[in-house]
Image (cartoon, rainbow, N blue to C red):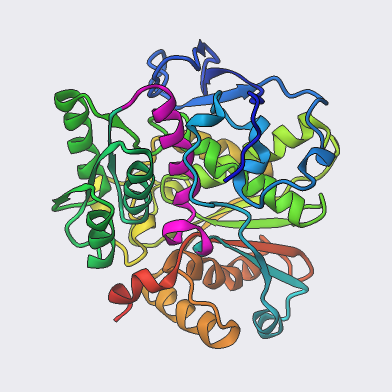
Amino acid sequence: MNFIKTQTSLASHLECSKCKKSYSLHELQTFATCCNKPLVVQYHATDSFGISDLQGRKSTMWRYREMLPVLDDANIVSLGEGMTPILPLKRLVAQLGLNDLQMKDESLNPTGSFKARGLSMAVSKAKELGVEKCVVPTAGNAGGAMAAYCASAEIKATVIMPSHTPKIFQEECQYYGAELILVKGLINQCGALAAKIEKEQDAFNISTLKEPYRLEGKKTMGYEIAEQMNWQLPDVILYPTGGGTGLLGIWKAFHEMINLGWLKADMKLPRMIVVQAANCSPVVDSLNGISKDISEYTESLANGLAVPVAFGQDMIHRVVKESGGTSVTVSEQEMIDGVKEMAKQEGVLVAPEGAALWKAIPKLIASGEISRSEKILMINTGSGYKYLENLN
């Protein structure tokens, strides 16, 4: 793959998402130890990088190279991720009497999900900083993506996932040569073991938002949405939210594009809507002032939504509030029904996480949170083919 030959990144430093303390890009970082919060990459956003610079570039997420944090192009580990299509859902539009419903289909990324974006970026930066072994706790797709990118980068990989995860996710990691460890419980139990391995084996822990770079890969969805929609944005974006990195990344991208002058400073940004599984809805509950014990959250057939504790929960809250968005839950049966409806009506086999968005729309219309006349965009985060075991 041909990349830009010179160092072009406009990344300047890392910043604590709470107190704004600066951290170096040139050292291996995890999260902000000052406040125990995620670190976020900051850029010198200048007019030196314009929309016209995109012309003729490869149709991958690396077309936005200047606003990505890898400093030496030789360290980029890419399998062709990004620039996934935005599909009009014409029959579903008619079914609900909507004006405009579209879906960005992340299932067409390498390893079948949006996780490819974050792991391409995280593994590239790990390579740049001399990491020799990575570990990740995963509900499924992130493990396969990390295993694939580590294989490409010649970095050892350990993947920790719940034992109830469908076998296709387990086998995928093993085919890529990763060490696979199965844990009884949800991803938070996997995270505890990953932290132990990090200390005992000197492995770099690529847990969601506990390192700064998966967010940067995920944000490229936001850049693509703007570019694919001719620098206009939808009124509403529905996002299936587990750890929330994609939601945060898209919102970050919109603000970066305003700083770059690609989007108008007074542009009305989309309302960001969090969709979670009814079985495991910590973000929805906290937004609604409901406090539950972590043990009350259980597994979901939508593996990516079975996240009982989101490390960046306060950041997710800010995005929902800043955007004027909201949150909603969807049941397991509704997700199954949604997968089948979308397959029959549109010819797309989406992950249960993506189907949850479709089933959330009637609820949001009924509550007055969205109107039928608005331009609605759903982000399908993965391929339904990997979930067929869960759907039977």
- Quarter of the image with the C terminus is bottom left
Q: Is residue 196 left or right of residue 266?
A: left
Q: Quadrant of residue 253?
A: top right
Relative to 131, say whether 22 is above or below. Answer: above
Residue lying at 35% horizontally and 35% vertically, measured from the top left = 206
Percent from the top left, x then y, of residue 347?
A: 56, 83
Residue lying at 56% horizontally and 71% vertically, measured from the top left = 358
Decide which of 227, 248 is in the foreground and name it: 227
Q: Does the magenta run of residues contain 117? A: yes
Q: Does the magenta run of residues contain 304? A: no
Our reading of the magenta stretch's main secondary structure is helix
Relative to 182, say whether 353 is above or below. Answer: below
Residue extent of the magenta highlight = 108-131
Decide which of 28, 372 is in the foreground and name it: 28
Residue lying at 61% horizontally and 46% vertically, measured from the top left = 61
Residue lying at 57% horizontally and 40% vertically, measured from the top left = 249
Q: Residue furthest bottom?
A: 344
**Could you tell me if residue 263 is visible in this image?**
no
Decide which of 118, 277 is in the foreground and name it: 118
Q: Is residue 59 left or right of residue 246?
A: right
Percent from the top left, x then y, of residue 261?
A: 83, 33
Percent from the top left, x then y, of residue 225?
A: 70, 53
Relative to 382, say whether 308 is above or below. Answer: above
Percent from the top left, x then y, of residue 155?
A: 30, 36
